[in-house]
Image (cartoon, grey):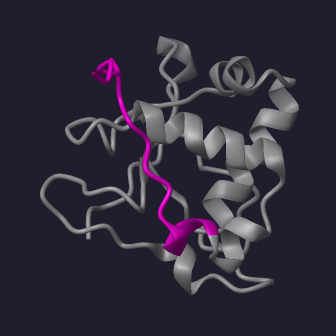
Amino acid sequence: MVARQAGQFICLYSELTESLAYRSLSSGARCLLQEMMALAWPDRNGRLAMSHERAAGLVRCTKKTAGTYLERLLARGFIKLEKGELWQQRLAREYSLTMVTRQGRRPSHDYLRWSEGDNFFGTNKKFAGVNETPELE
């Protein structure tokens, strides 16, 4: 008799792990991506609140390093910024994963179109704009 496992299952398809964008990530950025995937229940994708402090705690690094990981995930098309932070109200930025369905929409898989030198977040942006809420496609 096989014991039943409790909890959520994270599926890493070879389409994801063999992509050029995934292979270009550091192990820490890959770890943060997997932590975010664990948080992305079908009804929560698009509302994944992730501050640098929370990300740093999940992957056990500094806040500055966690910010770099988030920046790389944005630039390579693994995550999208859905809502900017409101630091006065202590609200973190909210993200969506591009490999997971969101509000009934099919995943965009932006990371599959990434190539060296591309930046899906924007050419002039180093990181997310304050209080930005991008329009839905």
Image position, residue 57 (x, y; %)? 71, 17
Image position, residue 5 (x, y; %)? 35, 21
Above or below: residue 3 compared with residue 126: above
In the drawing, does residue 14 fall left or right of residue 123?
left
What residue do we see at 87% from left, 24% from top? 62
Above or below: residue 135 compared with residue 95: below
Q: Is residue 2 magenta?
A: yes
Q: Is residue 37 magenta?
A: no
Q: Nearer the viewer, residue 65 or 4?
A: 4
Above or below: residue 22 compared with residue 81: below
Q: Nearer the viewer, residue 27 or 43?
A: 27
In the drawing, does residue 27 fall left or right of residue 92?
right
Q: Quadrant of residue 47?
A: top left
Quadrant where the image shows the C terminus: bottom left
Q: Quadrant of residue 106?
A: bottom left
What residue do we see at 70% from left, 19% from top? 53
Question: What secondary structure do most residues of the magenta stretch adopt?
Answer: loop
What residue do we see at 37% from left, 38% from top? 40
Q: Quadrant of residue 1?
A: top left
Image position, residue 91 (x, y; %)? 48, 20
What residue do we see at 12% from left, 58% from top? 104
Residues rendered magenta in the picture: 1-17
Q: Nearer the viewer, residue 119 or 88?
A: 119
Image position, residue 31 (x, y; %)? 69, 40
In the drawing, does residue 129 fall left or right of residue 6?
right
